[in-house]
Image (cartoon, rainbow, N blue to C red):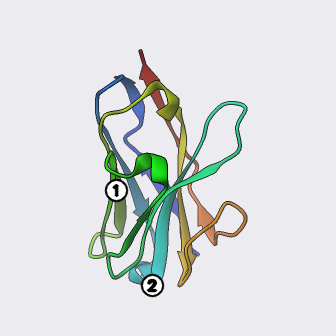
């Protein structure tokens, strides 16, 4: 069983930055592909970024160049550095974990409870 706890959300002005963190319990953290998703009001949950235990990263096209995912396998954390934030980035951001494969909206072994990110104009 893995528990995921996100933190770091908040209110920021457009153009600003936020860093989200996700702390994972368990002793096999490096075996999990970790990912971030987001869900804006009235919209479906969407993929943001993922990172393998090896450090290989994946990004949704709209986040490339603005968001950076990283992980610390020693401390069982994954982070999402978000720069140049736009109002359309406003959403609840979720951390997800899936062993061996990239999590998808439909398939993920574990989900966090989410953290709200609000970008004001």
Whether residue 117 sits left or right of residue 64 in the image: it is right
Residue 30 in percent (x, y) is at: 39, 81
Q: Quadrant of residue 10?
A: top left
Q: Quadrant of the N terminus?
A: bottom right
Pointer 1 with pointer 2, Cβ within 8 A: no
Q: CA distance from mark 1 to mark 2?
A: 17 Å
Residue 16's place in the image compared with 101, above or below, is above
Residue 94 in percent (x, y) is at: 54, 51
Q: 79 or 51: nearer the eye?
A: 51
Residue 118's place in the image compared with 38, above or below, is above
Residue at mark 2: 31
Q: 8 or 93: nearer the eye?
A: 93
Which residue: 38% across, 52% down?
A: 64
- Dot 1 falls on a residue whose secondary structure is strand
Which residue: 41% across, 15% down?
A: 121
- The residue positioned farthest toward the front in the image shown: 61
Q: Where residue 79 is drawn, which disc sits there?
A: 1
Which residue: 32% across, 75% down?
A: 55
């Amino acid at each position: 069983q893995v528990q995921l706890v996100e933190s770091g959300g908040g209110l920021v002005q457009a153009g600003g930055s936020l860093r989200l963190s996700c702390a994972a319990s368990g002793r096999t953290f490096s075996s999990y592909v970790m990912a971030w998703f987001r869900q804006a009001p009235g919209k479906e949950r969407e993929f943001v970024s993922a990172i393998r235990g090896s450090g290989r990263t994946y990004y949704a096209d709209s986040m490339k160049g603005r968001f950076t995912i990283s992980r610390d396998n020693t401390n069982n954390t994954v982070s999402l550095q978000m720069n140049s934030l736009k109002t359309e980035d406003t959403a609840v951001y979720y951390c997800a974990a899936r062993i061996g494969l990239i999590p998808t909206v439909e398939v993920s072994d574990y989900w966090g409870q989410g953290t709200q990110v609000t970008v004001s104009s």
